[in-house]
Amino acid sequence: MQSVVHIRLTEILKEKQMTRHQFALQAGLRPSTVSDLCNRPVHRIYLSTIATLCETLNVSISDLLVVEPAD
């Protein structure tokens, strides 16, 4: 059985009551990058981007990334 990794960015932003635009400005990321991470299936992501997401949101990698069974 194959699994997929889900980035919980949308959920975490809702929990922290932060818009994508606010987060992009705070993290120093392009708004389109944040939108892509929230909307599209992501096949590749730089480790530095994961580090930025975790540091800016003050979450651990295990909070951000979840392994789920593929549909």
Image (cartoon, rainbow, N blue to C red):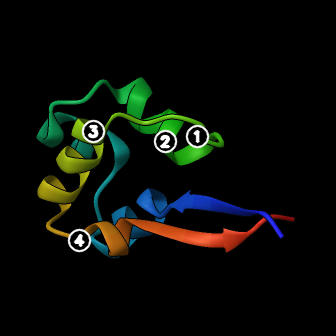
Residue 37 — which label? 2
Mark 1 sits on what residue? 42
Residue in the foreground of this view, choosing between 57 and 47: 47
Spatial CA span between label 3 and label 1: 12 Å
Residue in the foreground of this view, choosing between 6 and 40: 6
**Position of 8 relative to 26 (above/below):** below
Instruction: Say which residue appears at 64% left-offset and 39% top-offset.
Output: 40
Q: Amino acid at mark 1?
A: Val
Instruction: Say which residue appears at 84% left-offset and 70% top-offset.
Output: 1
Spatial CA span between label 4 and label 3: 13 Å
Instruction: Tell me the element at label 3.
Output: helix
Instruction: Tell me the element at label 1.
Output: loop
Mark 3 sits on what residue? 49
The picture places residue 7, in percent across and down from the top left corner, at 49, 57
Spatial CA span between label 3 and label 2: 10 Å
Q: Amino acid at mark 3?
A: Thr
Q: Earlier in the sequence, mark 4 or mark 1?
A: 1
Q: Is residue 20 left or right of residue 37?
A: left
Instruction: Point out the image quarter for the C terminus.
Output: bottom right
The picture places residue 65, in percent across and down from the top left corner, at 44, 65
Instruction: Say which residue appears at 23% left-offset and 44% top-offset.
Output: 22
- In the rendered image, which quarter is residue 6 located in? bottom right
- In the rendered image, which quarter is residue 5 located in? bottom right
**Position of 61 relative to 52 (above/below):** below
Q: How busy is the neighbourhood of tag 4: few (under 14 within 10 Å), some, or many (20 plus)? A: few
User: Looking at the image, do the residues carrying marks 3 and 2 touch, with CB atoms under 8 Å apart?
Assistant: no
Residue 69 — which label? none
